[in-house]
Amino acid sequence: MFSYLRNGDIHNGIKGLTNLPGLFTSDGDKIKYALLNHSTAMRTNISKGGPIFQGIRQCEAEIEKLMSRNNQLPSMAANAAASAAATRLSSPFSDNDIRIDNAALAVIMAKELAFLNRTIQMITLIANRYNEEQEDLTWGHDDDSDDDDGDDGADLEYGCGTPLQRSQSHDNPPAATATATATATAAANQLATTFLIASGRLMQRFNGLCELVGTNVILVNAMTTRDQPHSSAANMGEQLAAQSLVVSDIFLHFEKFDAEHRDPVVHAFLELRDISVYACKIMSMFAFSNLFRLTAGTDFDIYQPEDAIFTQGRDYCINPISSSSSSSSRDRERLACVSSVL
């Protein structure tokens, strides 16, 4: 979001917003102010661990506190019921203040979805590459053991050595060392599997969030995916067109809920926050496990969490464990941390 505020063509973006139903060119300055105010307030609130909507909209802030206090979020059925009730009780676009805020919230949600989507894609890439790396290591050990067995058999068959001579020239590792190696390998393999599961569940929740705000993951992907054969101008045009559709979808969805039925809007931002937190925890474990090296040569080798609202206030660096700790114990601790996300 903040990358867009700093470098994006915010004037043309807001001009496009004023073409949405119920908005006019004269609303441009109000939308710009709401966009800057809401983005800054959300970042401050999240960094301090406060309610997302504190200092933004009082109604949403109270709903958020109530939801957090009861530790309960509305279901999709409840969202649909609230939408139907809002449609019956009042017509859309009747409250100008809500309409302006909905436009700003739609842009914020769209931009945060795009950033979160890239984050989850990066997590998926690292998880897959790490799993492949562990599989290669496992197969490599298996091949080495097979070669050794084959050599022993050949030596004995052709009289080139005896079991005693082989044991003298190739000292076998102690049983404790072999057990420790096997344990470390098993822990690393389990960690790789856990990362794969975590990435899959993150994507599943992300797809649900896209549906929750009235858009779809295909459009969100189009906001962030670049087709290499195309020119930069063509890529940018396609991304802006997809972004316009996503913002429009979210705005029209938020407009279904009047001042008395804002629970679904709050729910969407709480879900965005929770998924972002889970993604941040996985990224922390990647940093701790030195796995960002697996992004070398890809579009993900530069990652700037400060560009987003919902990554603020979350630690990306974990103090390294003392070097006296064994590799297997470090893997077990990493596994415990990642498992807490699932």
Image (tube, helix red, strand yellow):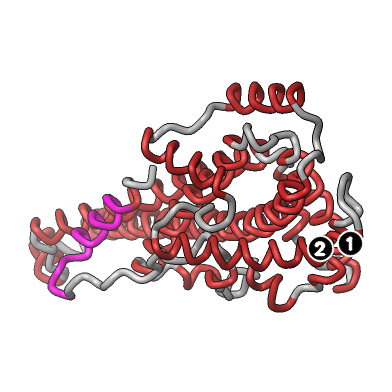
Task: Give coordinates of residue 285: x percent, y percent.
Answer: 37, 61
- Which mark, residue 74? none
The residue wearing badge 1 is 26
For the point 71% across and 27% down, the residue is: 86
Quick one: label 1, few (<14), some, or many (20+) residues within 10 Å?
few
Q: Residues within 10 Å of mark 2 (few under 14, many from 20)?
A: few
Give the secondary structure at mark 2: loop
Magenta residues (range): 323-337
Residue 159, by quadrant, is bottom left
In the picture provided, is 112 more to the left or to the right than 171? Answer: right
Are the residues at dot 1 and dot 2 in contact (C-beta closer than 8 Å)? no
* 54 drawn magenta: no
Q: Amino acid at mark 1?
A: Ser
Q: How many marks?
A: 2
Q: Secondary structure at mark 1?
A: helix
Task: Identify which residue is drawn at 50% across, 51% down.
Answer: 273
Q: Is residue 310 left or right of residue 143?
A: right
Q: Would you say residue 158 is visible in this rendering? A: no
Which of the two discs, 1 and 2, labels the residue nearer the N terminus?
1
> Which callout, 1 or 2, points to the residue nearer the camera?
1
Task: Give the residue number, with chain letter if any, for mark 2.
Answer: 227
The spot of residue 302 in percent (x, y) is: 58, 75
The one of 44 and 306 positioned closer to us in this rendering: 44
Query: What secondary structure predominates along the stretch shown in magenta?
Result: helix
- Asked if residue 330 lies in the magenta stretch, the reply is yes
Quadrant of the drawing holding the N terminus: bottom right
Q: Position of residue 261 (x, y in %)?
A: 63, 32
* Viewer-closest of 259 and 212: 259
Q: Is residue 70 left or right of residue 214?
A: left
At horizontal 72% and vertical 38% (from top left) the residue drawn is 214
